[in-house]
């Protein structure tokens, strides 16, 4: 009985194994000889059927990954290839899986408008692993060199952009410095104008004060002149009165003197008569006086 069970199990395994191979060959025919997209869809469907029979059948997974690459379903294709790489023992098959993985990653990079360099770096890494497993694969070597060259160009482009940004930043800083200098000059000019305005205001106040002082001086001078004029007039009147008084005094004195002189003359005349009565001495001199 046990022998029959073992034989039945082996027969089922062989039939299943041959079944997935048969389906995979059918899928290969549709994939290779496809006329339109419907043939590609049929091939993908049959590869999935083969995998359902045997999930470890790497040939079906590898060919399905290629079919998905043709439909630009790159991430699904990469996932299948990574399964093949993890389960495969044949180095050449591993190298082919890494090569196709790199092709998918290149396509993802191009679909990103060459902006996501991470896909390009992943592709370079995949081609490098492919060469490790198959050093004689010239296509893998060519693609690796191409990826490295593209990465170098990106580095140079990024460096140039950084330098350009730095130059632009320096220009902006220079413009900003010039603007700051202009603003500083403007501020200094405004400060000078402010000082000038303040000085003008001070001068204006000083002029106003000088005008007030001049007006006050003029009023004072005018008042002083009027006072001096009044004093002059008053002094002249007083002088005239004094002169008149002095004249009166002098006239009175003259009168007194004249009266005294007349009196004196009378006395002298009286004396002369008496003298004439006696002998006049010859040595007497007559003295005339002018008044």
Image (cartoon, grey):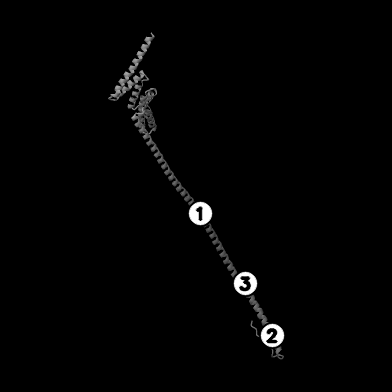
Mark 2 lies on residue: 268
Query: Which secondary structure lies at badge 3?
Result: helix
Which residue is rendered at x = 60% and y = 71% of the image?
A: 239
Query: Could you tell me which quadrant the C terminus lies in?
Result: bottom right
Whether residue 38 is visible here, answered yes or no, is: no
Could you give the CA–CA distance between mark 3 and mark 1, rounded to whole angstroms?
Answer: 60 Å
Q: Nearer the viewer, mark 3 or mark 1?
A: 1
Q: Earlier in the sequence, mark 2 or mark 1?
A: 1
Which residue is rendered at x = 70% and y = 86% of the image?
A: 271
Residue sitting nearer the eye, 126 or 64? 126
Measured as percent of width and height from the top left, residue 67 is found at 33, 25
Measured as percent of width and height from the top left, residue 105 is found at 37, 29
User: Residue lying farthest front?
Assistant: 136
Query: Could you tell me which quadrant the N terminus lies in?
Result: top left
Mark 3 lies on residue: 242
Residue sitting nearer the eye, 220 or 115? 115
Tell me, for residue 246, which label it has, or none: none
Mark 1 lies on residue: 199
Q: In this picture, is 12 found above or below 68? A: above
């Amino acid at each position: 009985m046990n022998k029959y069970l073992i034989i039945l199990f082996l027969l089922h395994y062989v039939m299943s194994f041959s079944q997935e191979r048969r389906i995979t060959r059918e899928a290969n025919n549709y994939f290779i000889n496809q006329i339109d997209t419907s043939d590609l869809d049929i091939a993908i469907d049959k590869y999935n059927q083969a995998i359902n029979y045997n999930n470890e059948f790497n040939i079906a997974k590898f060919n399905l990954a290629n079919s998905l690459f043709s439909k630009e379903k790159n991430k699904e294709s990469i996932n299948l290839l990574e399964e093949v790489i993890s389960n495969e023992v044949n180095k050449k098959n591993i190298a082919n899986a890494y090569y196709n993985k790199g092709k998918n990653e290149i396509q993802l990079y191009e679909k990103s408008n060459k902006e996501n360099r991470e896909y390009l770096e992943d592709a370079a890494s995949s081609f490098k692993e492919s060469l490790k497993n198959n050093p004689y694969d010239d296509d893998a070597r060519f693609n690796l060199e191409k990826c490295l060259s593209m990465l170098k160009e990106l580095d140079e482009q990024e460096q140039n952009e950084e330098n350009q940004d730095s130059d632009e930043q320096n220009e902006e800083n220079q413009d900003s410095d010039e603007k700051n200098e202009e603003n500083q000059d403007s501020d200094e000019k405004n400060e000078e104008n402010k000082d000038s305005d303040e000085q003008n205001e001070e001068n204006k106040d000083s002029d106003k004060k000088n005008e007030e002082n001049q007006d006050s001086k003029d009023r004072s001078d005018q008042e002083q002149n009027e006072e001096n004029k009044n004093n002059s007039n008053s002094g002249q009147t007083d002088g005239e009165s004094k002169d008149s008084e002095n004249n009166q005094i002098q006239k009175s004195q003259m009168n007194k003197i004249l009266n005294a002189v007349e009196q004196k003359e009378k006395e002298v005349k009286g004396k002369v008569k008496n003298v004439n009565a006696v002998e006049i001495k010859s040595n007497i001199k007559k003295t005339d006086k002018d008044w």
